[in-house]
Amino acid sequence: MTTTDYHAKYYAHELTKRCSSDSLEKLAASLADAQVDLNPHQVDAALFAFRSPLSRGAILADEVGLGKTIEAGIVLSQIWAERKRKILIIVPSSLRKQWNQELLEKFFLPSTILESKSFNQEVKQGKRNPFEQTEIIITSYQFARNKGDQIKSVKWDLVVIDEAHRLRNVYKTSNKIARAIKDILAHAPKLLLTATPLQNSLMELYGLVSFIDDYIFGDIKSYKNQFARLTSEINFDDLKTRIAPICKRTLRRQVLEYIKYTNRIPITQEFIPTKDETVLYDLVSEYLRRDNLQALPASQRTLMTLVLRKLLASSTFAIAGALDSIVLRLKAKLKNAEVKVSVEDELADDFETLDEIKDEWEEDEYEERLTKEDVEAIQLEIIDLEAFRDLAVSITENSKGKSLIQALKAGFAKAESLGASKKAIIFTESRRTQNYLVRILSETEHQGKIVLFNGSNSDEQSKQIYQKWFKQHQGSDRASGSKTADMRSALVDHFNSMFKFFDLYKMSLSRIIALGKNCL
């Protein structure tokens, strides 16, 4: 159909005419071509965001799986239809490509991923500030923090922050990334997306809400007195009333009328640690409980202990590498009386999810010259740690790994009986554990049917998959220009089309097997 000047004016009027903020008509025109089947709660959430004073922002906190990305896409479509082009999306680095594809495929919204490579390329081409774009910009938390000055200089129409629960501890001085992002976006309208607005404390709710508006709860002392005391006197009705204007949460049980969820069938595979594994676990656990540890700076002890316990639970291979790093650190400390390498850098090579929590790590405390007593304590600690490490290295097979083989057989048998595909996803937080799993699975019928997925994917198989994928999609919308994001797409596509087994690394969920379409 030919579009006349009359039609153009009519469409422009439909897109820009004033409508009530809680009216579906406000969104109807901008969603006319969207390739999504919208659910009532998603439209309601988008309208809620517009009813909230976007000069400050809103929080969409639906439970997992209810489509917060779709809700944000509805809001973005309307903002875009109103000819507002200063839009920024901040997400975990692993989700950048997913957002890029969904905006294009479901809402026909153009976006670009900004990371170090693409940012520097634009600077070399003479662009003073690469965040000044005519497309929606997608970037990671870490990159947003690093480029704070450039982001701050842009007058944003809307900033969407996915996985926003990462910001919930912004009230803590140690949470550097959250505090930096809050300062950078102080005057920008924000839309926060999170399935878990709080986990352990009502103080986390204070942090998340204060990211939108510092005045809803007043100062932190007042909030603690009213809502964070360990008493039965907390007025939860008042708390709900305070957050109601800016926070919208829908639960799964509220949408069962029109959303039918796939039934999940859990299958438990028990395992019993060997004697050596049990001894190692007990020894390292007792070590981490010591009052004075030379290897762990006081300012980092809590979080480093958390990481070490995660590695200990992952596999003996994971904890062996960590113990060796600690030994080398202590020996360097004895030799130089000053340690140049941070604890996080020592562990990040194996424990990649450290990226998600390292913003909560405080700076190293200043370490004075070692005393004679310090030297003696370090020497004794090194002896203990080397013994733990040697025990870990001597354990070449883990009972958990052997049980995994049996779990896969049981899972595949169940999947086959239900008519599902024989595909499995194994989550692990350690690269060393991942390598161990690849080794033992390659000795079974799964040999040649394993794909790795991790933060770097520097192995030869991943490189070949990426090169083939990039050659196929070069110059199309599928190739974003971000190698890390495209590598993710290449591996996922490869898994979907070729393989029945897939080992996924760098996820917050650990040691979980997904079997076909019926079990997670």
Image (tube, rainbow, N blue to C red):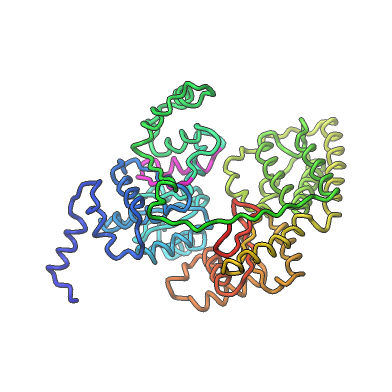
Considering only vertical position in the picture, is 412 above or below 304?
Answer: below
- Camera-side residue: 402 or 82? 402
Considering only vertical position in the picture, is 295 above or below 43?
Answer: above
Q: What residue is rendered at 83% in x and 37% in y?
A: 378
Q: Is residue 203 left or right of residue 422?
A: left
Considering only vertical position in the picture, is 92 above or below 437?
Answer: above
Name, please, the residue furthest toward the left.
6
* Residue 430, horizontal then vertical, whole percent: 68, 54
Judge whether residue 410 is colored magenta. Answer: no
Q: Quadrant of residue 350?
A: bottom right
Is residue 109 in view? Answer: no
Name, please, the residue furthest toward the front.
417
Q: Is residue 518 left or right of residue 261?
A: right
Q: How many marks?
A: 0
Q: Quadrant of residue 236?
A: top left
- Camera-side residue: 391 or 496? 496
Q: Quadrant of the N terminus?
A: bottom left
Q: What residue is rendered at 85% in x and 46% in y?
A: 386
- Camera-side residue: 134 or 64? 64
Judge whether residue 176 is colored magenta. Answer: yes
Q: Is residue 365 left or right of residue 40?
A: right
Q: Quadrant of the C terminus?
A: bottom right
Q: What residue is rendered at 37% in x and 53% in y?
A: 71
Residue bounds of the magenta highlight? 175-195
- Camera-side residue: 269 or 118? 269
* Residue 358, horizontal then vertical, whole percent: 60, 44
* Residue 400, horizontal then vertical, whole percent: 75, 55
Is residue 281 in view? Answer: yes
Q: What residue is rendered at 50% in x and 32% in y?
A: 203
* Residue 91, horizontal then vertical, whole percent: 48, 53
Considering only vertical position in the picture, is 318 above or below 372?
Answer: below
